[in-house]
Image (cartoon, rainbow, N blue to C red):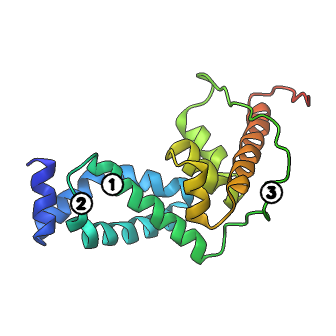
Amino acid sequence: MSENDIIKGCVAGKREFQKKLYETFAGKMLYVCFRYCKNREEAEDVLQDGFIKVFKYIGTFKFEGSFEGWVRRIMVNTAIEHIRKKKQVHVFDDLENIIESPESELNITGKLNEKELLKMVHLLPDGYRTVFNMYVIEGYSHKEIAETLGIAEGTSKSQLSKSKEFLKTLLHKYLDIEVKHE
């Protein structure tokens, strides 16, 4: 059964195809949702809401580009909506006038596994975590993040910079390296 067959079966409302689509993508998409949520239970709720939207709007998929990418975008947007509803995104006022220091890159080559890094990302404050996930993991631009979250582009950049600094501090503690302030 090809991906196109599954999509067409879902458009036709056939349960067996919906089940196959869910089984194919649920694991990966739960991981996507978990990056935005505080715990597994919350991520599972977002996943379910996301799949409801996938099945509702699957007829709009144009068979252009990656279907998995299309599903992922729905999951990310559903997670962001969930955060907004809970009023957990605490972003700062417009910070465009603040001069930002150059962004430091996180270099953890081989020192952490994915699970350990995910735990550190979960320690970020909600606003930082949301911007970090959208920019670093999902590949959104600062303009797209600003539009999606209803914040200034400069605020998105500041949140990303602060999230990287926060993670850098956590990594230094984890790796037992003395943090040197420049």
Q: Nearer the viewer, residue 96 or 19?
A: 96
Q: Earlier in the sequence, mark 3 or mark 2?
A: 2
Assign a secondary structure to mark 1: helix
Q: Earlier in the sequence, mark 1 or mark 2?
A: 2
Query: Which residue has dot 2 on it?
Result: 61
Residue 101 to residue 58: above or below:
above
Q: Residue 149 placed where, x, y %?
A: 60, 65
Query: Which residue has dot 3 on it?
Result: 95
Would you say 59 lies left or right of 117 here?
A: left
Q: CA distance from mark 3 to mark 1?
A: 32 Å
Q: Amino acid at mark 2?
A: Phe
Query: Which residue has dot 1 on it?
Result: 70
Q: Residue 61 placed where, x, y %?
A: 24, 60
Residue 56 to residue 79: above or below:
below
Q: Residue 163 placed where, x, y %?
A: 72, 47
Q: Amino acid at mark 3?
A: Leu
Q: CA distance from mark 1 to mark 2?
A: 8 Å
Would you say 61 lies left or right of 49 here?
A: left
Whether residue 38 is visible, yes or no, is no
Q: CA distance from mark 3 to mark 2?
A: 37 Å
Q: Residue 71 placed where, x, y %?
A: 33, 56
